[in-house]
Image (spheres, helix red, strand yellow):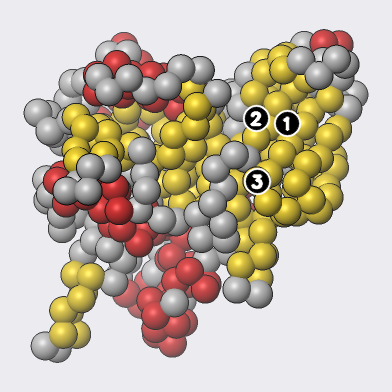
Amino acid sequence: MYEYVGNLHAHTTYSDGAGTHAVVAAAAIRAGLDFVLTTDHNVLVQGVEGYYRNPDGRQVLLLTGEEAHDMQRDPQRNHLLVYGAHEEMAPAAQNRPPQRLLDAVNAAGGCAFLAHPIDRAVPWLGEGSYSWEDWDLQGYAGIELWNTMSSLKPLLATPFSTAVAVFDFPGRLAGPDPDILALWDRLLAEGRRVSAVGNSDAHATPMRAGPLKRVIFPYEMLFRMVNTHVLLEHPLTGDWRADGGALLEAVGRGRSFVGYGLPGDPRGFHFEARTESGETLATFGGDVRPGQTAELRISAPAPARLRLIRQGEVVKEGYGTALTYRPSQPGAYRAEAWRAYRGRERGWAFSNPIYVR
Ligand SMILES: [Zn+2]
Ligand SMILES: [Zn+2]
């Protein structure tokens, strides 16, 4: 398996972001990403995709999708991340229920994730909530489990907490919103296939305070934080169309995990189902039959608190670099790793489920 790390939610000057695609690509390279996908609001930017290189020769694959929603809806809700559709999807979102947009994305061969499904309002700053609201929905690939910028909003309850969070965001960020983890487990318990992605939602907007102007959350900083780690059976080839197709197909199937880079590099985190003789049956997003699987195995690149969760219930937990469990019941099993960083345990890696059924 070949692991590629990328970010699948960022804004450019085509919507409310401050940087061009070239600026986003250069920041992604400096942060060590293999790919980055921009999602401007209700616009699919074409003609900018491809491999970008920095002067030192390092490169990144830049892809584009979009974040589409019904702009007439009041209040604004239901932001949908659209990947791999290769055509403008925003018109299908206008004055229609989100199912129509989802159907159009799937018909175009793309896949869709519900962006920041639970998003907190910050009333004193006039910031609204952009949660997902219409849950009578079929055909989405998954949810955005961890959106870095949306994770900032609960830290902005008062002017003082805002000053602390803006000054030291990494010190305050602990993990995905527990309510989004619980939401994911509920959807899995209903028997749905729901994959997760983790993204920045970077805008790199300059903040002004009198004569001072500063970008407080630049692209590069956010690209070092929460990302999606994609597992491929074959290495990338250098052909951007083929590589983009392979990455987005894997993202849509959940052959990935969400990783947070600051507590340590989560590359190498793994979750698999194995036979008695140690043969791999399935990894992230895979399916196995109950009688087939001797054990589920989590492994981490460094010691961490590992948890195996079946539809909201922690079935095994331990500290170290590996954890195994013999599943006795069918269900969607997922793995988590939590690691200490600056004196506090942080969410480090969140696998997509292995479906035992
Ligand atoms: Zn959004
Ligand atoms: Zn966004």
Q: Residue 149 shows which numbered tag?
A: none
Relative horizontal placement of residue 169, taking residue 110 as reference (left or right): right
Residue 255 locus on image (x, y percent): 53, 26
Query: Foreground mark, 2 or 3?
Result: 3
- The residue depicted at 68 percent of the width and 55 percent of the height is 338
- Which quarter of the picture shows residue 108? top left
Residue 235 locus on image (x, y percent): 42, 21
Whichever of labels 3 and 1 marks the residue nearer the N terminus, that label is 3
Total marks shown come to 3
Relative horizontal placement of residue 328, taking residue 139 as reference (left or right): right
Query: Which residue has dot 2 on it?
Result: 353
Q: Amino acid at mark 2?
A: Pro
Query: Which residue has dot 1 on it?
Result: 333
Q: Secondary structure at mark 2?
A: loop
Q: Are marks 2 and 3 in contact (CB under 8 Å)?
A: no
Whichever of labels 1 and 2 marks the residue nearer the N terminus, that label is 1
Query: Which residue has dot 3 on it?
Result: 301
* Real-space Cα separation, disc 2 to disc 3, in angstroms: 19 Å
Q: Amino acid at mark 3?
A: Pro
* Real-space Cα separation, disc 1 to disc 2, in angstroms: 5 Å
* Screen quadrant of the C terminus: top right
277 to 259, vertically: above or below: above
Query: Foreground mark, 3 or 1?
Result: 3
